[in-house]
Every structure is written in structure tokens, then in C-alpha cells.
């Protein structure tokens, strides 16, 4: 049965393949302050050489759980950086600090997959053909040209053409998805089933994408198509018992390409996307990680993951 998108407000206010490799790239990396966040007023540092393995980082676990964080990357290859507007080179639409936020999940035995490159290079959570996820609604594409602010990402006449988009798809998109598919296949072979948890975050107010303030926690299962109803109900039952965070299931964010493509309950793979309002664990204005807010949220995230695995 599909769940309706009802916001819960707190009372107190089988193409599973193997990983591939690709050539090394020089990258611009937005500078980070001691708390690990990119400072919005600093310029990128000089180019640095990196190996092919830096396109993504996979931390294999022993539980039937893979956490994918496709928008955590911040690096921009040096052959792309000169084409971007100065503001875009600071990658403001990053899912800031989600790798840090979910680091506790290693204690649960989770595998964690993290990309190096920014979603401005290519969006790993979009269909490879650039098709729309939400037809008729504003959204960003496979190689975004417009930021969430509505401003242009590229300098005039410097946006990627079809050939460049295909090059990036092969160099950056495909290796991540090959690694993701291979890890899911490994976990399913070991346990008979696997759960893919898509970890995302976004500013709590983005007028281009949605009206008003986003609920704190936004679960997406493609309206029930990517995950068994029993698993989702365990999570929503848990959320219904707490009053600290507002939440919704299959509201504005129903799950992106990764959730929809890899979630195959009939084949033993469930996929759930969780889009967090960034205000729940960081300062949205400065991009600073707030360890107090994050620690409080991590307690609930741990319970959600355990409920999902039960």
C-alpha cells in the first residue's frame, strides 16, 4: 500500500556489475576550515594531482547495508574549473558534511560510498540520459547549469555540450554506479538481501525547488516502489514516536535516480532516500558543522537504521 505524503510536525513547535577505473585528474578542492567545511569567501587552492581511486571512496562493511552519499563531493577537475562562475567554484549546493554525519554507521557494519567530485561536475543521482525525475517541476540535470539559487553555474557560452556531458558520464558517473552496483551485489550474495540508504541534505529553504520550509526529515521510496512497506512502516513508526523533528514520507523528495533504479524489493534490494534539512545538523549560512545538533540527530539516525535493518 502506498503512503500518502503527510507531514508530521513536532508538538513542540538486476544490472549489478563490478567497479571500473579511469584516468587520474587534477582537481580544485574548495578550501576547508578546521571544522571541515568550505569557507564561502576563500578561493580554491592550486591544482593537486590525484589518483584514479579518488573518484570515489568505498568503505566495505559486513552488514546488509550500503549508505550512498552521492552529493558529498566537493572537488572540481582543473579542466572544468575555469569554465565555472566564481561562486559556483565554491560548490554551494553540496550536501555538506553528510559523510561526517553518517560516520557512526561504520559501527553498525554499514558499507559507505562517497564520491570525490562535486555534483556540479556531474550529478550522480540523475539518470544517465538526463531524463527528468519530476516532470513539470523545477530540478537540476545530469550536468547542472543552474544552481539552487537560480544563478548560472557556468560562464557565458561555457556550459558543457553533449560530447562533454558524455565524457563526464564515462569518467565520473559510471565508475560510481559500477562500484555501487558491485557492492550491492556483494551484500546481497552474503546476506540474501541488502538495503541501500541514500543520504542527502539540502538547505531548509530553496524557493526554486519547493515552497516554504522543508520538513526536517524527508523519506523517499518512490511512492513505495523502491522499498517494502514493512520496512518503511518500521521507520515511520519510530519517527511518529518522537517530537524533536518534523518529517514526511514521499513528499517533495520521493527518491532520485539511485533510489528508483536500484530499489528492487522483489529481488531482495530495498532502497530508501533520506533528505535532511541542513539546519538539523549545521549552520546553513556559514556551512559550519554543528557537533551539538549533529550529535542529537545522529542518535535518531542510528535508531532509524537499526529499525530499517530489523
Image (cartoon, helix red, strand yellow):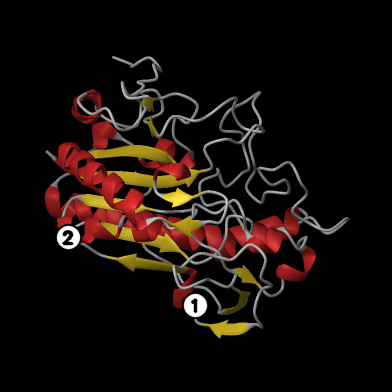
Q: Nearer the viewer, residue 260 or 104?
A: 104
Residue at 57 percent of width and 50 percent of height = 285
Q: Secondary structure at mark 2?
A: helix
Task: Say if 199 sits above or below 210 in the image.
Answer: below
The location of residue 127, given as percent across then percent down, is 55, 43
Residue 230 appears left or right of 51 = left
Could you tell me if residue 62 is visible in this image? no
Q: Nearer the viewer, residue 90 or 219?
A: 90
The location of residue 269, given as percent across then percent down, is 26, 40
Residue at 76 percent of width and 46 percent of height = 151
Could you tell me if residue 172 is visible in this image? yes
Q: Secondary structure at mark 1?
A: helix
The residue under label 2 is: 107
Of the numbered discs 2 and 1, the one sitting upstream in the chain is: 1
Q: Nearer the viewer, residue 41 or 277?
A: 41
The location of residue 144, given as percent across then percent down, is 67, 49
Task: Decide: few, some or many residues near mark 2? Use Cα within 10 Å; few <14, some 14-19, many ≥20.
Answer: few
The location of residue 208, given as percent across then percent down, is 67, 33
Residue 117 appears left or right of 97 = right
Q: Residue furthest right?
A: 157
Task: Say if 285 sits above or below 270 in the image.
Answer: below
The residue under label 1 is: 52
Q: Report how far apart the C-alphas of labels 2 and 1 lie in the structure.
A: 28 Å
Q: Disc number at residue 173?
A: none
Q: Residue furthest front?
A: 12
Task: Decide: few, some or many residues near mark 1? Use Cα within 10 Å; few <14, some 14-19, many ≥20.
Answer: few
Residue at 41 percent of width and 18 percent of height = 5
Q: Nearer the viewer, residue 235 or 174?
A: 235
Q: Quadrant of the N terminus?
A: top left
Residue at 38 percent of width and 39 percent of height = 273
Residue 27 appears left or right of 178 = right
Amino acid at each position: 500500500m502506498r503512503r500518502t505524503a503527510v507531514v508530521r510536525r513536532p508538538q513542540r513547535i538486476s544490472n549489478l556489475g563490478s567497479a571500473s577505473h579511469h584516468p587520474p585528474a587534477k582537481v580544485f578542492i574548495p578550501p576547508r576550515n578546521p571544522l571541515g567545511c568550505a569557507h564561502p569567501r576563500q578561493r580554491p587552492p592550486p591544482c593537486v594531482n590525484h589518483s584514479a581511486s579518488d573518484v570515489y571512496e568505498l568503505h566495505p562493511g559486513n552488514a546488509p547495508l550500503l549508505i550512498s552519499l552521492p552529493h558529498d563531493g566537493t572537488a572540481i577537475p582543473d579542466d572544468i574549473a575555469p569554465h565555472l562562475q566564481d561562486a559556483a567554484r565554491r560548490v554551494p549546493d553540496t550536501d555538506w558534511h553528510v559523510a561526517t554525519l553518517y560516520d557512526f554507521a561504520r559501527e553498525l557494519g554499514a558499507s559507505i560510498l562517497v564520491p570525490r567530485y562535486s555534483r556540479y561536475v556531474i550529478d550522480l543521482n540523475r539518470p544517465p540520459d538526463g531524463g527528468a525525475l519530476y516532470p513539470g517541476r523545477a530540478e537540476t540535470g545530469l550536468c547542472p547549469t543552474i544552481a539552487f539559487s537560480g544563478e548560472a553555474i557556468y560562464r557565458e557560452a561555457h556550459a558543457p555540450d553533449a560530447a562533454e556531458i558524455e565524457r563526464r558520464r564515462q569518467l565520473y558517473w559510471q565508475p560510481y554506479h559500477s562500484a555501487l552496483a558491485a557492492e550491492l551485489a556483494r551484500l546481497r550474495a552474503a546476506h540474501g538481501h541488502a538495503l541501500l540508504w541514500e543520504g542527502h541534505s539540502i538547505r531548509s529553504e530553496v524557493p526554486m525547488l519547493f515552497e516554504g520550509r522543508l520538513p526536517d526529515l524527508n523519506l523517499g521510496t518512490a511512492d513505495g516502489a523502491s522499498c517494502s512497506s514493512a520496512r518503511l512502516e518500521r521507520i515511520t513508526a519510530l519517527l511518529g514516536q518522537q517530537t524533536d523533528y518534523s518529517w514526511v514520507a514521499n513528499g517533495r523528495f520521493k527518491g532520485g535516480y539511485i533510489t528508483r533504479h536500484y530499489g528492487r524489493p522483489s529481488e531482495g534490494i530495498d532502497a530508501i532516500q533520506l533528505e535532511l534539512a541542513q539546519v538539523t545538523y549545521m549552520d546553513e549560512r556559514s556551512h559550519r558543522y554543528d557537533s551539538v545538533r549533529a550529535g542529537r540527530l545522529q542518535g535518531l539516525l542510528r535508531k532509524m537504521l537499526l529499525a530499517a535493518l530489523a
